[in-house]
């Protein structure tokens, strides 16, 4: 996974709550094994709504998405994260994230920043006022957002998630260090709850 | 200290704590589907990483398969590549696949329980947000993304931060024609689409207890629509009876041993939950969504809300939902003409769902101009329904009777509505464009869907006279 240290880019305001992954990556656009993820992101809105924020000239090179509550609700489809990365959006700043979507971000080196309501509102006001004229920088090492219109904003992120993003850790590699414990668990359960360790079709002899 | 059942299952599956603080939870059964698994197979192959436990892993073909009679890989042209990649990836990795034409084919969340793969107190993972459907049998199931799916294939554990716990106590007794779907929609309406975010929900109380397994699965299926990380109903004697004798369930002496353990799977008296919600289901009427998220719900006799009576923040969202749905503030939904009715999906396409709908339909005709479909949740459900003659009931009434798959729920197989159509559907998401571009979806129970197909208008099943 590509490590995340800091990212500088145009901040795009998409100021609604509960934006779901169907909207970010319509299933009708996922009909190929390897779709063009750059085009796929918010495809329907980009095609049908000339006024959609990502169609505006000042947001043609987005870097940071700024949104409301519960971003990424609905389906678990990871294409909704891959579409962000394909558009060079490597940070999403929200009031909250849906669980599976946030997890998919962490798996792909996309930084999900959660700001409390007041901080978020202040940041949104700066993003709206800036209107794509200058970039913002999100630095994970110092846990700050900096840019036009005000002082640096500090954000919190669980230490474990921060470390994983900073180091671009291979998640599977990290877990495989615990292979002995996985084997030990399997042996223990095979003795105490053996039905969990075998999934046999009794119709087949 | 008294423990919740969630605590017990989590602790029993805790393998290790990783350096980054995440807990490794063993996955007892891993069920894949063809929309996402091929990507993970490819990544693992590039990394030269084998699948750790192919014997605990199963592959379903469900999201992209055609529902047309006599279907093959090509019947849905855009599905063929996924279906073949799934077959090939499963073969290479020695994973059993419930392929097209297999008698066990169907929607993963329907197939796994009916084959007896889902056991009380076991953990499951599926790369699909509706994974917790199988919580109806007392299993702890997690939906995940594609990268996580690869992680589970390689390690057989899922790396998670421990979620919080929530109790939803369902009191009272459901009235006639009111089912788990109505209860679930009402819960989502009460707490909102992110109300259970970060929580594992235990559904308890007399109304949950009284539900047969298929309804408990419907209840747990919709858990993600309020943002829940997982959801389950603690198992009881009716759970054990339901599982007994199924092909993958333990047999003989092993069954007796398992049963003795399963009877210990309860939340201890006095155990603390991080949150609790109590809902009296006694007076509940059939529910229906009016808007574009699953929390925008009305009783069937209710009126569409008026955005001008709402405070600032939510007003725009309400107005935008009304506009998309083609509705006016204050109007009733009952009586509104519909174009299409869909009965199917992991939410509501098990045998009793189809039986309930058939009981409403029997001897009647689908209203003129309405396209009505029934898509069984699995090929087994389809065979069992046909053995009971339900297919005749639906066909005689003018319904399409399809082969099993996700069909119009996910919209990945070509089944969909036309722009502007009003669709009444037993599925789980009424998001904009979900069932086809510009379609207007109302989520309901199978009974309400059946009554609506007959009336040609959104109907209160309780008021449909005798045929």
Image (spheres, coloured by chain):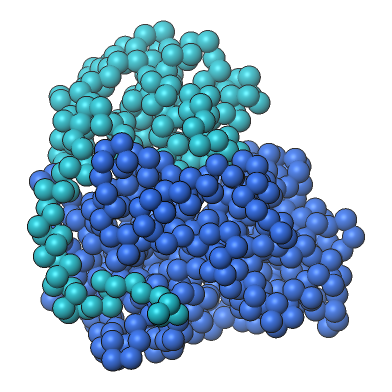
Palette colour of chain A: cyan
- Compared to residue B448, the image places residue B423 above or below, namely above
Q: Nearer the viewer, residue B432 or B15?
A: B15
- Compared to residue B394, the image places residue B443 above or below, namely above
Judged from this view, the residue extending furthest toward the right is B368
Residue B55 location, x and y as percent?
A: 32, 64
- Quadrant in the rendering for residue B463: bottom right
Q: Residue at x 38, y 65 (%)?
A: B231
Image quarter of the C terminus of chain B: bottom right
Q: Residue at x 77, y 62 (%)?
A: B400
Judged from this view, the residue extending furthest toward the front is A205
Does any portion of residue B220 appear in the rendered image?
A: no
Residue B461 location, x and y as percent?
A: 74, 73
- In this picture, residue B65 sits left or right of residue A70: right
Residue A132 location, x and y as percent?
A: 43, 12
Q: Which chain is blue?
A: B
- Quadrant in the rendering for residue A158: top left
Image quarter of the N terminus of chain B: bottom left
Residue B275 location, x and y as percent?
A: 31, 64
- Compared to residue B262, the image places residue B400 above or below, namely above
Does any portion of residue B213 appear in the rendered image?
A: yes
- Quadrant in the rendering for residue A185: bottom left
- Compared to residue B167, the image places residue B126 above or below, namely above
Q: Nearer the viewer, residue B445 or B99?
A: B99
């Amino acid at each position: 996974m590509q490590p995340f240290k800091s990212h500088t880019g145009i901040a795009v305001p998409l100021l609604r709550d509960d934006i779901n992954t169907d909207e970010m990556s319509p299933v009708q656009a996922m009909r190929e094994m390897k779709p063009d993820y750059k085009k796929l992101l918010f495809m329907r809105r980009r095609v049908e709504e000339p006024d959609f924020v990502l169609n505006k000239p000042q947001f043609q090179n987005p870097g940071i998405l700024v949104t409301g509550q519960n971003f990424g609700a609905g389906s678990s489809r990871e294409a909704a994260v891959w579409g962000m990365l394909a558009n060079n959006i490597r940070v999403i700043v929200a009031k909250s994230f849906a669980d599976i979507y946030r997890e998919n971000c962490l798996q792909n080196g996309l930084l999900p920043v959660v700001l409390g309501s007041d901080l978020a509102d202040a940041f949104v006001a700066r993003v709206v006022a800036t209107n794509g004229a200058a970039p913002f920088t999100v630095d994970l090492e110092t846990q700050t957002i900096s840019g036009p219109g005000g002082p640096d904003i500090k954000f919190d992120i669980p230490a474990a998630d921060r470390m994983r993003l900073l180091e671009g850790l291979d998640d599977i590699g990290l877990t495989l260090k615990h292979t002995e414990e996985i084997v030990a668990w399997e042996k223990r359960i095979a003795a105490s709850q053996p039905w969990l360790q075998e999934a046999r079709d009794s119709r087949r002899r | 200290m008294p423990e919740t059942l969630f605590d017990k299952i989590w602790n029993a599956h805790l393998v290790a704590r990783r350096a980054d603080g995440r807990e490794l939870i063993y996955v007892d059964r891993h069920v894949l589907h063809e929309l996402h698994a091929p990507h993970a197979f490819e990544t693992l192959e590039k990394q030269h990483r084998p699948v750790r436990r192919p014997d605990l892993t199963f592959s379903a073909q469900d999201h992209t398969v055609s529902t047309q009679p006599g279907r093959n890989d090509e019947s849905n042209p855009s599905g063929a590549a996924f279906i073949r990649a799934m077959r090939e990836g499963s073969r290479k990795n020695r994973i059993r696949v419930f392929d097209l034409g297999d008698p066990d084919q169907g929607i993963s969340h329907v197939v796994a329980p009916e084959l007896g793969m889902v056991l009380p107190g076991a953990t499951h993972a599926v790369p699909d947000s509706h994974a917790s459907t199988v919580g109806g049998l007392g299993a702890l199931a997690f939906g995940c993304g594609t990268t996580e799916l690869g992680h589970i294939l390689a390690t057989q554990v899922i790396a998670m931060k421990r979620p919080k716990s929530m109790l939803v106590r369902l009191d009272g007794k459901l009235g006639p024609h009111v089912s788990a779907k109505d209860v679930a929609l009402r819960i989502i309406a009460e707490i909102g689409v992110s109300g259970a975010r970060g929580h594992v929900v235990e559904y308890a109380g007399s109304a949950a207890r009284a539900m047969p397994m298929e309804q408990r699965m419907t209840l747990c299926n919709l858990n993600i629509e309020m943002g829940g990380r997982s959801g389950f109903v603690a198992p009881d004697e009716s759970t054990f009876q339901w599982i007994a004798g199924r092909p993958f369930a333990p047999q003989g002496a092993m069954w007796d041993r398992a049963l003795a353990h399963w009877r210990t799977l309860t939340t201890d008296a006095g155990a603390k939950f991080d949150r609790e919600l109590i809902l009296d289901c006694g007076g509940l009427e059939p529910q229906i969504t009016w808007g574009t998220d699953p929390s925008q719900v009305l009783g069937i006799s209710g009126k569409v809300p008026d955005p001008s009576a709402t405070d600032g923040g939510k007003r725009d969202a309400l107005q935008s939902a009304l506009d998309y749905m083609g509705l006016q503030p204050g109007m009733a939904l009952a009586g509104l003409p519909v174009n299409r009715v869909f009965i199917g999906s992991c939410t509501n396409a098990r045998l009793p769902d189809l039986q309930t709908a058939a009981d409403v339909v029997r001897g009647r005709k689908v209203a003129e101009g309405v396209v009505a479909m029934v898509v069984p949740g699995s090929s087994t459900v389809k065979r069992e329904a046909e053995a009971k003659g339900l297919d005749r009931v639906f066909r005689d009434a003018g319904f399409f009777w399809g082969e099993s798959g996700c069909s119009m729920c996910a919209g990945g197989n070509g089944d969909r509505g036309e722009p502007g159509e009003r669709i009444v559907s037993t599925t789980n998401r009424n998001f904009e464009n979900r069932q086809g571009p510009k379609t207007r979806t109302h989520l309901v129970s199978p009974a309400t869907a059946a009554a609506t197909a007959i009336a040609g208008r959104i109907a209160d099943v309780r008021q449909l006279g005798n045929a």
